[in-house]
Image (cartoon, rainbow, N blue to C red):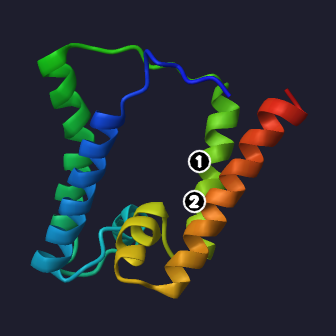
Amino acid sequence: MLIDWNHFTPGLSLAGGVLLGLASALFILVNGRILGISGILGGLLIPKAGDVAWRVAFVLGLLAAPMLYAGLRGPWEVRIEAGWGTVVAAGLLVGIGTRYASGCTSGHGVCGLSRLSPRSLVATVSFMAAGFVVVYLVRHALG
């Protein structure tokens, strides 16, 4: 295995992980809710009275953050080595998986594991194992 030293950023990755952990902890302390993106988005599909504004604000924040970054640092090159059909199919499969798992990687992997949830441990191990298998198959067995 070769490491691409030009794109190896352990410091930035650690900082991002710390920020994600802090945001998750603050979210549950302030709102009493788990910071799971699929649950937040899912709540917008079947809205409940008084439960929409914070979800919309959260999603707008997710969309505004990269735009703010681009405004401060300038645009960056996005490189996706797949066609639109593959990207759409992958997105649909992830959406279906989060429904079956009753949550996404952020809900289970960040919030669930920090609460020592056995269900989240199983879900996170399953997410990771499936990702490893798919990457291996696509890059080595099929590629």
Label of residue 1 in the image: none
Q: Is residue 87 above or below residue 16?
A: above
Residue marked by disc 1? 91
Apparent side of residue 28 relative to residue 38 in the rendered image (left or right): left
User: Around disc 2, counting alpha carbons within 10 Å, would you say few (fewer than 14), some (14 to 19), or many (20 or more)?
Assistant: some
Nearer to us in this view, 73 or 46: 73
The three-letter code of the residue at mark 1 reads Gly
At a point 28% along the width and 35% down the height, the residue shown is: 12
In the picture, residue 63 is in which quadrant?
top left
Residue marked by disc 2? 95
In the picture, residue 16 is in which quadrant?
top left
At a point 30% along the width and 68% down the height, the residue shown is: 35
At a point 13% along the width and 78% down the height, the residue shown is: 29
Is the residue under label 1 in contact with that under label 2 (CB below 8 Å)? yes
Image coords of residue 68 (percent x, y): 15, 30
Apparent side of residue 52 relative to residue 13 in the rendered image (left or right): left
Label 2 to label 1, Cα distance in Å?
Answer: 6 Å
Nearer to us in this view, 130 or 36: 130
Nearer to us in this view, 88 or 9: 9
Image coords of residue 96 (percent x, y): 63, 64
Image coords of residue 13 (percent x, y): 34, 40
Q: Is residue 76 above or below residue 69?
A: above
**Which residue is at the far right?**
141
Q: Is residue 65 above or below residue 76?
A: below
Image coords of residue 58 (percent x, y): 21, 57
In the picture, residue 140 is in which quadrant?
top right
Apparent side of residue 103 relative to residue 115 in the rendered image (left or right): right
Element marked by disc 2: helix
The three-letter code of the residue at mark 2 reads Gly
Element marked by disc 1: helix
At a point 20% along the width and 70% down the height, the residue shown is: 25
Report the number of numbered marks: 2
